[in-house]
Amino acid sequence: MKNKIKVLRAEHELTQEQLAEKVDVSRQTINAIEKEKFDPSLSLAFKISKLFNLSIENVFQYE
């Protein structure tokens, strides 16, 4: 699944570690999602989207 997490993190000046702490996952999980090696659970996708105040569709694009 494509996503804009890396761009959004940069815009909000967050490290992978900081984002991981905010959504209660490991830094490795954020890294894997950014590299599109892992698709987040629906609940994690909602947490990330809510954190950036965006809809899920604006953060993740299903292909």
Image: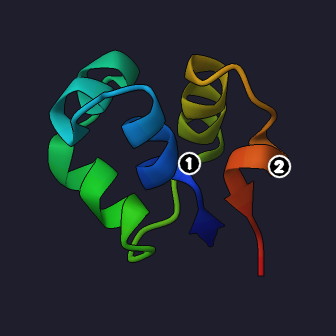
- Give whichever of 8, 19 is nearer the camera: 8
Of badges 1 and 2, nearer the viewer stands 2
> Is residue 41 toward the left or the right of residue 23 in the image?
right
Q: Residue furthest bottom?
A: 63
Question: In which quadrant of the rendered view does residue 10 lie?
Answer: top left
> Is residue 31 toward the left or the right of residue 49 in the image?
left
> Is residue 21 toward the left or the right of residue 23 in the image?
left
Seen at 77% across and 71% down, the residue is: 62
Give the number of the disc on residue 27.
none
Seen at 70% across and 19% down, the residue is: 53
- Give whichever of 54, 22 is nearer the camera: 54
Question: In which quadrant of the rendered view does residue 38 lie?
Answer: bottom left
Q: Which residue is mark 1?
A: 41
Q: Which residue is mark 2?
A: 57
In the rendering, at what x and y percent does residue 18 appear? 22, 25
Give the Cα separation between the discs numbered 1 and 2. Answer: 14 Å
Count neighbours of disc 2 (C-alpha within 10 A) and say few if under 14, some if 14 to 19, many if 20 or more. few
**Which element type, helix, strand or loop, lies under badge 1?**
loop
Question: In which quadrant of the rendered view does residue 16 lie?
Answer: top left
In the rendering, at what x and y percent does residue 19 appear? 32, 29
Count neighbours of disc 1 (C-alpha within 10 A) and say few if under 14, some if 14 to 19, many if 20 or more. few
